[in-house]
Image (spheres, rainbow, N blue to C red):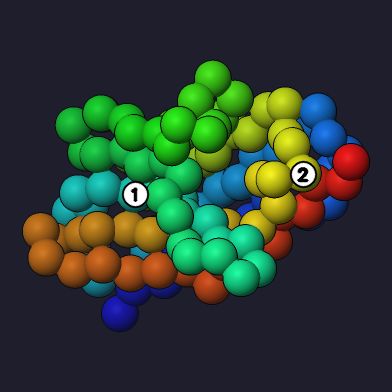
Amino acid sequence: QVQLMESGGGLVQAGGSLTLSCAASGSIFSINAMGWHRQAPGKQRDLVASTTSGGSTNYADSVKGRFTISRDNAKNTVYLQMNDLKPEDTAVYYCYVRYNDRYWYWGQGTQVTVSS
């Protein structure tokens, strides 16, 4: 069984910053990748950022230069530093983990709301 503990969402004004964190625990032998997707009302869930065990990162074009993903391997935790937030960043942010070379698991989601 795997658990993902997400935290850090909330309400912020445009131009502000938030940091999301997601800690994985449970029956995990190895983590292959962790990252974040987001889903706004009426829209599909899209990738925001991801990081692999090898240290490579990937970002959606809309967040490049504003968001930074990082990982603490010792804590099985991934962070998403979000700067210069815009109203269009408003969404539910979902953490995910790919582990043991074959499994995926999603967190419950955390709401991020950016007011104009």
Residue 87 left/right relative to 26:
right
Q: Which mark is residue 72?
A: none
Vertical comparison of 35 with 85: above or below: below
Asked whether 3 or 87 is in front, the reply is 87
Asked whether 47 or 43 is in front, the reply is 43
Quadrant the C terminus occupies: top right
Q: Which mark is residue 34?
A: 1
Quickly name the residue at label 2: 87
Residue 61: x %, y % from top left: 45, 31
Q: Callout 1: few (<14), some (14-19), or many (20+) C-alpha neighbours within 10 Å? A: many
Which quadrant of the figure has residue 65? top right
Residue 83: x %, y % from top left: 68, 28
Q: Callout 2: few (<14), some (14-19), or many (20+) C-alpha neighbours within 10 Å? A: some
Residue 77 left/right relative to 34:
right
Quadrant the N terminus occupies: bottom left
User: Furthest residue to the top?
Assistant: 65
Asked whether 8 or 93 is in front, the reply is 93
Residue 43: x %, y % from top left: 55, 65
Which quadrant of the figure has residue 70? top left
Q: Residue at x 51, y 40 (%)?
A: 79
Residue 10: x %, y % from top left: 78, 54
Q: Residue at x 38, y 59 (%)?
A: 96
Of the two numbered discs 2 and 1 on the same chain, state the one appearing first in sequence. Answer: 1
Mark 1: secondary structure: strand
Mark 2: secondary structure: helix
Q: Is residue 75 visible?
A: no
Residue 105 left/right relative to 114:
left
Q: Amino acid at mark 1?
A: Met
Q: Amino acid at mark 2?
A: Pro
Asked whether 86 or 109 is in front, the reply is 86
